[in-house]
Amino acid sequence: MGTVECFQVEGVRLWFPSLDHAPPHLHAKRDGEWECRIWFMEGSPRLEMKWSEKPMSAAHRRAIVGLAAGHRLELFAEWERKVRTA
């Protein structure tokens, strides 16, 4: 598992699972509340919930999607390094 380095969101864990599948995406989790995938290379970043005990706040959604959009190339480089070569 490779932790996302190009940006952080307070209170949220961001990572790339080792040997994960294409298309490029990252995972985000707020312990005990929710986990989602963020697909960042196909047009606008798209967030897909994996599970949710509590709804994701609008602030977290905006932060994660906005940072993924702003760091798309850095995320792809990290994904290539941490997932594709694992």
Image (cartoon, helix red, strand yellow):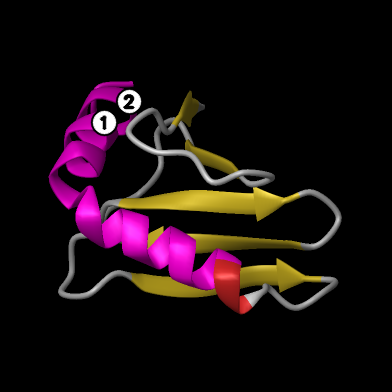
Is label 2 in a helix, a strand or a loop? helix
Query: How busy is the neighbourhood of tag 2: few (under 14 within 10 Å), some, or many (20 plus)?
Result: many
Is label 1 in a helix, a strand or a loop? helix
Query: Is residue 77 part of the magenta span, yes or no?
Result: yes
Query: How busy is the neighbourhood of tag 1: few (under 14 within 10 Å), some, or many (20 plus)?
Result: some
Query: Would you place residue 73 above or below residue 2 in this image?
Result: below
Q: Position of residue 10 (x, y in %)?
A: 62, 44
Q: Quarter of the image holding residue 83?
A: top left
Identify the residue at image location x=15%, y=74%: 43
Disc marking residue 54: none
Identify the residue at image location x=32%, y=33%: 6
Which residue in the protein does label 1 denote? 78
Callout 2 amino acid = Lys
Callout 1 amino acid = Glu
Q: Going by the image, does 84 lie left or right of 36? A: left
The count of marks equals: 2
Q: Position of residue 48 (x, y in %)?
A: 50, 74
Q: Are dots 1 and 2 in contact, CB under 8 Å?
A: yes
Q: Quarter of the image holding residue 51?
A: bottom right
Identify the residue at image location x=65%, y=51%: 29
Q: Position of residue 2 (x, y in %)?
A: 45, 26
**Nearer to the camera, 34 or 1:** 34
**Nearer to the camera, 22 or 34:** 34
Which residues fall within the magenta stretch? Answer: 60-86
Which residue in the protein does label 2 denote? 82
Q: Position of residue 73 (x, y in %)?
A: 13, 44
Q: Going by the image, does 66 lie left or right of 33? A: left
Identify the residue at image location x=35%, y=49%: 21
User: What secondary structure predominates along the stretch shown in magenta?
Assistant: helix
**Nearer to the camera, 14 or 25:** 14
Is the C terminus in the top left, top right, bottom left or bottom right quadrant? Answer: top left
Residues under labels 1 and 2: Cα distance?
6 Å
